[in-house]
């Protein structure tokens, strides 16, 4: 029941997406512009697109780097834990073997 309250319906998500896009997208007003004004507007738009593509590339690269860092960190964390567990098992087995051999009388130091 709690899960239903936290998650939004498909319609709510779509409405939020449209509201955000409406805020971010500025209407292109080119009616009545001269040839040179249209060329200037095209240069402006090209510059904006280039800047946004560069930002997108940087963000994607940073995201991939962070994913690798997280997965590497988790691997190192769990591989370290596995090594410790294996060392403890080996130490326990070694102690148990020494104890067993000592008790049976066949162990000599």
Image (cartoon, helix red, strand yellow):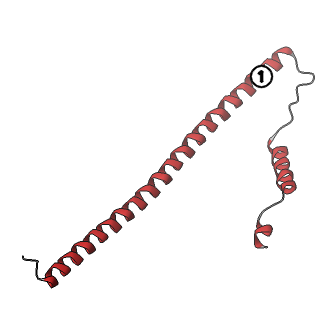
Quarter of the picture containing the C terminus is bottom left
Residue at (14%, 82%) from the top-left corner? 102
Horizontal placement of 92 versus 99: left or right? Answer: right
Q: Nearer the viewer, residue 71 or 16?
A: 71
Horizontal placement of 10 versus 44: left or right? Answer: right
Query: Residue reaching furthest right?
Result: 32
Residue 19, image x, y percentages: 85, 49
- Provide the secondary structure element on which disc 1 rests: helix
Residue at (51%, 45%) from the top-left corner? 65
Horizontal placement of 80 versus 109: left or right? Answer: right
Query: Residue reaching furthest top?
Result: 35
Q: Nearer the viewer, residue 10 or 29?
A: 10
Residue 52, image x, y percentages: 67, 35
Residue at (31%, 70%) from the top-left corner? 89
Relative to 25, is 36 above or below? above
Q: Nearer the viewer, residue 109 or 39?
A: 109
Query: Residue reaching furthest left?
Result: 109
Residue at (69%, 27%) from the top-left corner? 47
Quarter of the picture containing the N terminus is bottom right
Crowd rating for badge 1 (residues with CA inside 10 Å; few <14, some 14–19, many 20+): few
Horizontal placement of 29 versus 89: left or right? Answer: right
Residue 59, image x, y percentages: 60, 42
Relative to 83, is 17 above or below? above
Which quarter of the figure has residue 75? bottom left
Q: Nearer the viewer, residue 56 or 82?
A: 82
Relative to 96, is 49 above or below? above
Residue receiving disc 1:
42
Query: Residue reaching furthest bottom?
Result: 103
Which quarter of the figure has residue 92? bottom left
């Amino acid at each position: 029941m709690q899960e239903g309250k936290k998650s939004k319906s498909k319609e709510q998500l779509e409405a939020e997406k449209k509201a955000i896009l409406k805020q971010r997208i500025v209407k292109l007003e080119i009616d009545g512009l001269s040839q040179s004004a249209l060329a200037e507007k095209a240069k402006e738009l090209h510059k904006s697109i280039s800047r946004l593509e560069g930002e997108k590339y940087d963000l994607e690269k940073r995201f991939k780097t962070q994913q690798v860092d997280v997965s590497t960190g988790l691997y190192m964390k769990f591989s370290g834990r596995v090594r410790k567990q294996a060392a403890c098992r080996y130490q326990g087995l070694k102690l148990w073997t020494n104890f067993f051999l000592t008790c049976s009388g066949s162990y000599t130091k």
